[in-house]
Amino acid sequence: MTSATTMAAALPAEHRERLMQIAREVSFEAGTRLFDEGRRADRFWIVRTGVVALDLHVPGRHAAVVESLGHGELIGWSWHFPPYVWQLGAKAMSPVRAYEFDASAVRAMCADDPEFGRAIAVWVGRVVAHRLHASRTRLLDLYAPYGSGGRP
């Protein structure tokens, strides 16, 4: 992911510091599911080390990996938008260390401080836009007649 979508690049120092005050350090073994599509989105993570795969349930098949995320990247954005339900699943592909955040607490912080809330919303929006663009490019590479949309 581009640096513009990592927390360190997207949030001003004072907002990063405020957010990190409620961070909790967690670890996941390789193969651990962080969350499943359709479940309640009540937290999110920033990866410190390791790789997390975002995946999509495909009936009758293994989950399809749609993106792999690593150091500094946001795992989960569905916590920010009602109805607060995961749109994808996530699985640790290697041992992962991350910062975990309680979604309700962060949303309350956003409501209490509009400047902080705007910064969080812009950051999460950038992440969603980046991932949508990356997904579009992957689909074009897979299904477009000439790769990622180039013309003959």
Image (spheres, rainbow, N blue to C red):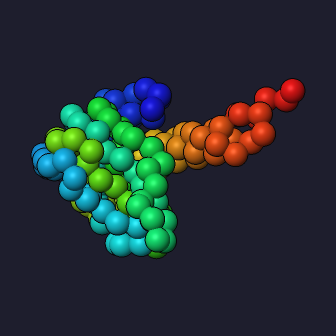
117, 85: nearer the viewer? 85
The residue sitting at 39% across, 41% down in the picture is: 68
Which quadrant of the view contains residue 1? top left
Q: Is residue 62 left or right of residue 18?
A: right
89, 114: nearer the viewer? 89
Looking at the image, is 1 positioned above or below residue 103?
Answer: above
46, 64: nearer the viewer? 64
Residue 130 x/y as whole percent? 55, 39
46, 146: nearer the viewer? 146
Residue 148 x/y as whole percent? 70, 34
Q: Is residue 76 left or right of residue 71?
A: right
The residue sitting at 45% across, 44% down in the picture is: 67
Residue 129 x/y as whole percent? 57, 44
Farthest right residue in view: 152
Residue 29 in view, yes or no: yes
Looking at the image, is 99 positioned above or below residue 64?
Answer: above
Quarter the C terminus occupies: top right
The residue sitting at 48% across, 71% down in the picture is: 59
Q: How many marks?
A: 0
The residue sitting at 19% across, 47% down in the picture is: 30
